[in-house]
Image (cartoon, grey):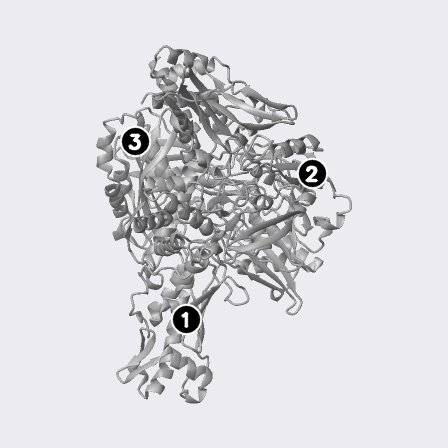
Amino acid sequence: MKSAKFDHQRTTSLADALAALGNADGEARIMGGGQSLGPMMNLRLAQPDLLIDISRVAGLDGIDMTGSSLLIGARVTHARIEDGEVPGVTGAYLQAVASGISYRSVRNRGTIGGSVAHADPSADWPSALLALGGEVTISGQGGERRMPLDGFQIGPFATGLGYDEILTGFDLPVLSDGAKWGYYKVNRKPGEFADAIGAVVMGPEPRAVCGATESAPFRVTAIEEKLAGGATELSVADARDMIAAHDPGFDDYDLQIHAVALSRAVGRAFA
Amino acid sequence: MTELTLKINGEDVSANVEPRLSLADFIRDHRRLTGTHLGCEHGVCGACTVLMNGEPVRSCITFAVVADGTEITTIEGFDEDDPMAQLRQAFHENHALQCGYCTPGMLVAARDIVTRLPDADEDRVRLELAGNLCRCTGYVGIVNAILSVLEQRRG
Amino acid sequence: MADGGATDGKGIGARVLRKEDARHLAGRGKFTGDFRRPGQKELAFVRSPVAHGRIKSVTKPAGFEHCVFTTDDMPGMLPMRAPSKMPGYKASDYPALAIGKVRFVGEPIAVCVADTRAEAEDLAQATQVEFEELAPVVDMLAAKAPDAPRIHEDWDSNLVMETFADDDFGKIADRATVVIKREYRMARHAMNPMEGRAVFAEWDDRTDQLMMWTSTQVPHLIRTGLAEFLGLEQKQVRVIAPDVGGGFGCKALLQPEELVAGWLTRHLEVPVRWIEDRREHLVTGANCREHHYFITIHATPEGRMLGLDCDVTVDAGAYSVYPFTNGLEGAMAHGNLPGPYDLEVYRCRTQTMTTNKPPLMPYRGVARPGVCYAMEMTIDALAREIGVESHEIRKMNMVKESAMPFMSIAKKHFDSGNYAKSVEMATDMIGFDDIRREQQTPPADGRLIGVGMGSYVEQTAHGTSVFASWGVAMVPGYEQATVRLTPDGGLELRIGVQSHGQGMETSMAQMANEVLGIDPAAVTVTHGDTGLTPYSTGTYASRSMVMAGGATARACRVLAERMEIIAAHLLQCERAEVSVRGGKVVSGKGEVSFAEIGRVWYLNPDELPDDVDQGGVEVTMGYRPEPDSGAFTYASHACKVAVDVDTGKVKVLDYVIVEDCGTIVNPMIVEGQTYGGATQGIGTALFEESAYDADGNPLASTFADYMMPGTTDAPHYRIDHMESPSPFTEYGIKGMGEGGTIPTPAAIGNAINDALKAIGAEVNETPFTPRRVRAAIIAAQKNQQGDAA
């Protein structure tokens, strides 16, 4: 179980990394912590020609809160978030999510940007951040751009990121003191990828996300409306109907556990 | 081939390696430090856990070239380390190993727990150790050993 | 006669800490994958991506044709053949590399040789194989259809073997008015020692020997098999098992990769190494446990079980494995299904079917986790039906201590024990009555609590007569041990079994201590090397402590007698006045250290008496219990679970074990083996499954898809021991390495069904995944709605 051959390019600046990406022949992949790509390459499920290593790129590992904006660099590891480096209520929410990702030795290397760019439907960050809202910051040959987290992931392992672009970080909302949130993951064992994710964040507008689907996580409109209407609990039966309205292609069991995840996420938010 | 310079167990090491060489294979086959074991090579079982700059990482899914400039500590590199000495004794006394294959990774992960989470209770120890598989012991001795070291360190 | 020489509390019964630990804790264990020689080559296999097909062509990568070998390139390498004398058994040749046809996904087709494993995998990836795909047989029940595709064309069906025993149920018809019928399935899974299989081979020109270091439980059998299928003389093969990272059965058989490595190193004249990776293990090692049951218990309304009627189907996979065959599971299912119970009539048919899956191998517990699960789950179904607690039914029906020794209805010769007592103790330990009270107030979180139990009796260390009755190619005989005093008074102990986690370097030294009183630290246990140890069929079937331990005791006794002769002379006293105690030979006139005896024998033989035994201070003795029908360990496990009704997820909250393995040599090791076994049982019960799609493609080829029990899944076990010595073995020891795995699926399944009884739901297929538990709940709800309507 050894990776196929590839070329490796170390980069120390974003400009270097973008240039390497632009000049690449064949398939180039950006690698930060490599905790998702590493296994896939060992299994030869991914066989890139070029690996662009951004693990030393300066400036992508910041956590900065200014006013209503929280900037988190793509290279911030799950472990740093778990250890409470992100301040405030947003930080508490992200901390709870981060501490449930895989295992500590993976969290020490794995990054939030890598996870969102990799866009594994079962991963935590795509769902958790969608529930928070905010924007993805992106660099390309033509400069920087932003995309809302809404719509950033478009399918399994597919995002709005261009082939020659690099995800550089996130601009996330700063939740007010007392803002409620709940996150619930159904999985077989701690650290395993999720079978279902429910994420609820009561920001200015309530956001409720159904995650760990066959495709991209999605917001469940009816649940958000219910929460906006002042509801503080959600039955599994209601959650089933509300999720089913989005036609997610679940069989009965998948619908059930996604409904449970959202019901319990709401329960945790208002516990 | 890519040039690589790092420190392993305090020793400066330079080498030219294929980019696809994992840190684990570099440690085992090139440096002949065979205490680091490969159990799954996709980051789940924890047998290959080593310290990189003092933090536990999976050496099987970390390419050696990525470790350039880092300090790596393998199971062979803890001879002067107090927490590891305590853990080794506790693993011995609590029958925390049978075949011994998962043991080096377990010890490195356990060292992280006893140093990072001094107040951990049994549930927390079990949660933190969920990424290290042992097929022999049922984890009884391992968990007991770690709890006993936590207890000792709390004095 | 010397015995009871132990004076320092390190003999039988002592919690002696393990001698093996130091090297592993330091990271200085030596596993097969750790070997490296200048010029060595690494191997990777081209494996079949189809479950059933004819190979039309193999195209090797251009320029590297000489690095890729198919069976046509390897003259003299014969298919493995494991015959059986079981009536009607159909043996199947298992080629190390496919010959013309493939019969399971993962079957080796070609081997690639390169400087690194990565390069060998490059070659494997670049090798093209064209197939004519054939319809696969994926399910063992479907395999029985008359028009099912034939996996072995020359067979008239897919039946490997059938056993059948009928009985007259008319005898009990008027009393056994309660009839409980159930259907159960146990999923195929993989054994998953943390070290996969691994081979390092080189040819030694000096000794003209194939030297093979391999991760095996049975080095002597591997040697015999390698010689047979590579066309070598036995003396031309030496097999060494260095540190072995767990076995559990899959390393108790000759493997295709061992044959291939042996052939290659001989013909390429370079050392070769193959290390199984986890994906290979999960795909090609998906080889155990897969059974199906239609089972019926006939009982009185009070719960006295009178009759048992069962149709067992075993999914044996594609080939018969050397040497144990793929018929062992069926034979053992037949003999073990009635468990510890005293029944009047027993009818059982076992059918072992061949399918397009990896060859079935004996996994820790062999067949008994399946039969115990089917039997014990049905007992609890009976209990629910008649409204009697199942522990009462167990106690009522178990063979009584006063009846021992007892010939069971399945012709198992139970030796000793109080089976019902284990049930009673486990019931108390789990707090059965408290749980029943707790169940009356449903918890606020909506989870349902259940309590369940599984009891078993396990034949261990079964000997010549038992294996001969199974007709397998290899039958164990007298187990031997060699002891040798060193010139400085230490002891070398050589055993043909192999220790891979069981701690035999410690427990066998304790056995020597028991007889000689020598400090276990002064004993070196050598095992796992055909060049250094007596021939042995190896470590499996919970036999090593009874067999090799018994041989060790006997060899030590003879050594003691010989040392006494020498010591009596040195002390100038009568032979009767001296005895071995505490690692010395003592008499009223003084004492002689073992070091002194070693010195005299080896270095100053001029001081020896005339009547010295010329065999010196090295003794080999053989041992076999009489009768050799096995020592019967038994246990009852009880557990408390919580079932999350909304998700179907099951959590084991508490787990207790009461076990009796006769005289305990090292309680610490016994407990460690039991906890580890039970945790594998939790894997079987809740997590582990090698599922296949309809085309025979494995669906679990990584640990992302194949769930292993981890720290949060294993409960905080509580254990208690009983000690009923076997009357048939040295010191009354019984084997116990496997037992922990046996009742766990039953105990957990029963606890789940207990939790779900109000809903009327029952699970009947392992693993009891959240999806299956939910399906059972929904089915029960639909039933009730149907009843209401």
Q: Residue at x 39, y 32 (%)?
A: C182
Mark 3 or mark 1: whose residue is earlier in sequence:
3
> Which label was assigned to residue C54?
2
Q: Is residue A172 above or below residue C576?
A: above
Tell me which corner region of the image, top left, top right, bottom left or bottom right, holds residue A256.
top left
Label 1 is placed on what type of residue?
A: Ala
Q: What residue does disc 1 label?
A: C555
- The CA span between labels 2 and 1 is 55 Å
> Which label was assigned to residue C449?
3
Residue C159, percent from left and from top: 56, 40
Chain letter of the residue carrying label 3: C
Comparing C368 with C345, the one in front is C368
> Which label was assigned to residue C661?
none
Instruction: Please determine if labels 3 and 1 lie on a single subunit.
Output: yes
Q: Residues within 10 Å of mark 2 (few under 14, many from 20)?
A: some
Asked if the residue under mark 1 is in contact with the one under mark 3, i.e. CB atoms within 8 Å, the reply is no
